[in-house]
Image (spheres, rainbow, N blue to C red):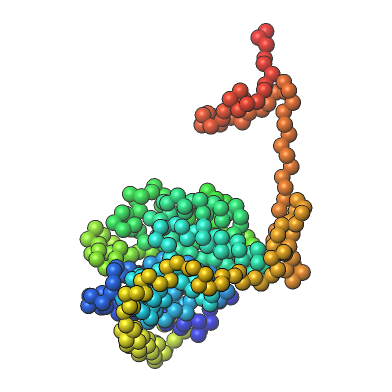
Amino acid sequence: MPLTQPQHLELYYWMQLNRKLEDQLTLLFRQNKIVGGLYSSLGQEAISVGTAYALEKQDWIAPMIRNHGALLVRGFRPRDLMMQYMARQGSPSGGKDGTSHFGDLTDRHVVSPISMLGDLIPVLTGVGLAARYLGRREVALTWIGEGGSSTGVFHEGLNFAAVQRAPLILILENNLWAYSTPTYLQTALEDFADRAKAYGIPGVIVDGNDVVAVYETTRAAVERARRGDGPTLIEAKTFRRKGHAQHDPAGYVPEWMRQEWEAKDPVLRYENYLTEQKLWTETEKQKILAGIDRELKEELAAAEASPLPEPEEAARGVYCDACHDIRPVWKRSPDELKPPRQETAQWFLDGQPALLPIETPAPAKQPQKDEPVAVATNPGHRKQSPSPRRAGLRVKKQRKK
């Protein structure tokens, strides 16, 4: 379904809010009000906003450190991110973390980031599978950088998701630099979407600086996952226009590369698109920008009014010693979720199959004693084809004539 005119303007609002919020965070960093590092998504706003906007309210996300736009789309306020970076008491983590490591499992369906890159992939695969078992048609989405795609858990998690046909969308943000390592020194691949071929799932390439293309590509993957057709790997090609964090001047990036990608700025590009398609007027644009400026002033005032946490708070909430009762929130009876006593498992939801039948493969024919066995050979990789004797198989010896 194509975007409506109000939705187009809403996408622009989220992208500008993302950018202007990071401008404010940069000022706070220079004022020494930010505790720890600050990670910018300058030039990558279209990816965070476009992917998160393609989801439904019941779906799940697990952002990384640059996905501020996704957090805003999912309902977190600018003051939440400001207080989080300033380690204030009113922050989502209560002042116990100075970066974007927070989430909301109850209302917003946001899983907190994991610093070990790639680990969110199996976690979100599990979230998607759990939703399936509970009869919910929910989709899980997470992000990874091209550098993080070289971790072992990236491959293990994506392979597991593919085999299980989990409702997972993995957004690979190829911003050309893994800290200071360019992509050509990391892999011989030109397109990271080709990694999907190894797992038998679709690999799609999208212009990460085109928010409409990002939205439409993600939306198609979401619909595919919700149908039960399994995961999709989407490579969003973009560029990291600042260093790894605020302390990194990124002097290793060639100047010509900076200039080339600054000309592809996603916000400016979307402004031109809205004008060319006659989707707004200059008055509407200025109204959106003025509203964002007012909103950020109010959010900043609220964030700075929040005090630093008391020292004693550091020891609270670390361990749970029967402080509250933790129970699963079942939407179906647990008895329904136990595998039936049969080889083919089948559950139904509203009269329709909620799970695909599990087919038990027929047992392979076992060779009889002294029966010749055909062994597959691969001329290009002979070592991969073990001899019948090494494989533990009996073969009939050929007598010399």
Q: Position of residue 329 (x, y in %)?
A: 61, 72
Q: Position of residue 258 (x, y in %)?
A: 28, 65
Q: Position of residue 11 (x, y in %)?
A: 45, 79
Image vertical order of residue 9 relative to residue 184, above or below:
below
Q: Is residue 256 visible?
A: no
Image vertical order of residue 325 relative to residue 346, above or below:
below
Q: Is residue 184 visible?
A: yes
Of all residues, the one furthest to the front in this rendering is 321
Residue at image point 52% right, 48% down:
198
Residue at image point 47% right, 54% down:
154
Relative to residue 47, is residue 396 drawn left or right?
right
Which quadrant of the rendered structure holds the C terminus? top right
Q: Position of residue 318 (x, y in %)?
A: 42, 68
Residue at image point 69% right, 18% down:
396
Residue at image point 41% right, 58% down:
117
Which quadrant of the rendered structure holds the N terminus? bottom right
Relative to residue 258, is residue 116 drawn left or right?
right
Q: Quadrant of residue 21?
A: bottom left
Question: Nearest the camera: 321 or 132?
Answer: 321
Question: Nearest the camera: 178 or 320?
Answer: 320
Q: How many numbered marks appear? A: 0
Of all residues, the one furthest to the top in this rendering is 401
Q: Quadrant of residue 223?
A: bottom right
